Amino acid sequence: MSKNEDNILDMTDCNTNKTLAEELREAESVEKESEDFLKRAIEIQNRALQFVEAIPNKNVKQDYKNTMKDNIVELLKVVAKQHALLTMVMGKYQIQTELVDIKLQKILEKRVTPELSYAAMVSQNRRRSRNRKRDEGPIAIIYPKQEGEKFNVKQKVQSGINPAKLQIVIKNVKNISKGELLIECGNEGDLNKIK
């Protein structure tokens, strides 16, 4: 058994009902056979050429012998092309088997991690991002001189304070009840510049 077969004995291919381990065994045997493929083809070609040479001259014309030799050479060219194609496919196969191994490892790692039930999930504390409070900066509250100036206060402050010119950071501006305006600054120095 190869190292890949240990982890994948229980997984089956839905099309052929073969385990992945059996598929790997077959692929390894094809790989071994493909290495000897070209050697066997060359041996067969040499035997065929020897057979053509051994045919008595009186039975076969020289042109016919040359035609048979050319056909055998053409056959070997086809075999060589097929071998090159097979080598390329086997290279891609190796890459794919490595990818499959990586994916199988990830699947097995996911199996190892326990799945949480609803009760276990609820009993855990909330994640920090949802639970984190926003940092609050210093706050200034601006009151209107008269209660009816609710919208005028915000407009006057916006026209009178230019954060880029004063080089201050204003985090938030919010209207609150009775026309009051709440301004949140980046730090105490910025708040003092506004006052």
Image (cartoon, rainbow, N blue to C red):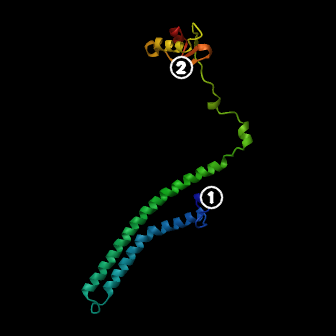
Q: Residue at x 45, y 12 (%)?
A: 166
For the residue carrying disc 2, how many other residues have a C-alpha within 10 Å: few (<14), some (14-19), or many (20+)?
A: some
Disc 1 target residue: 6
Indicate which disc, 2 or 1, sits on the residue closer to the N terminus.
1
Q: Given the image, on which type of amino acid does mark 1 rest?
A: Asp
Q: Nearer the viewer, residue 31 or 14?
A: 14
Question: Does residue 8 appear left or right of residue 159 in this picture?
Answer: right
Question: Does residue 50 appear left or right of residue 193 in this picture?
Answer: left
Question: Does residue 108 appear left or right of residue 67 in this picture?
Answer: right
Disc 2 target residue: 171
Image x and y of residue 1, in percent: 60, 62
Q: Nearer the viewer, residue 41 or 82?
A: 82
Name the quadrant containing residue 143.
top right
Instruction: Indicate whether 7 appears above or below 79.
Output: above
For the residue carrying disc 1, how many other residues have a C-alpha within 10 Å: few (<14), some (14-19), or many (20+)?
A: few
Q: Given the image, on which type of amino acid does mark 2 rest?
A: Lys
Instruction: Indicate whether 111 appears above or below 155.
Output: below
Q: Residue at x 34, y 82 (%)?
A: 50
Disc 2 is placed on an element classified as: strand
Q: Residue at x 54, y 55 (%)?
A: 100
Image x and y of residue 177, in percent: 62, 16
Question: Can see residue 138?
Answer: no
**Disc assigned to residue 128:** none
Question: Can see residue 25?
Answer: yes
**C-alpha distance separating marks 2 and 1:** 59 Å
Image x and y of residue 53, in percent: 31, 84
Q: Nearer the viewer, residue 42 or 143?
A: 143
Instruction: Indicate whether 71 appears above or below 137.
Output: below
Q: Residue at x 36, y 81 (%)?
A: 48
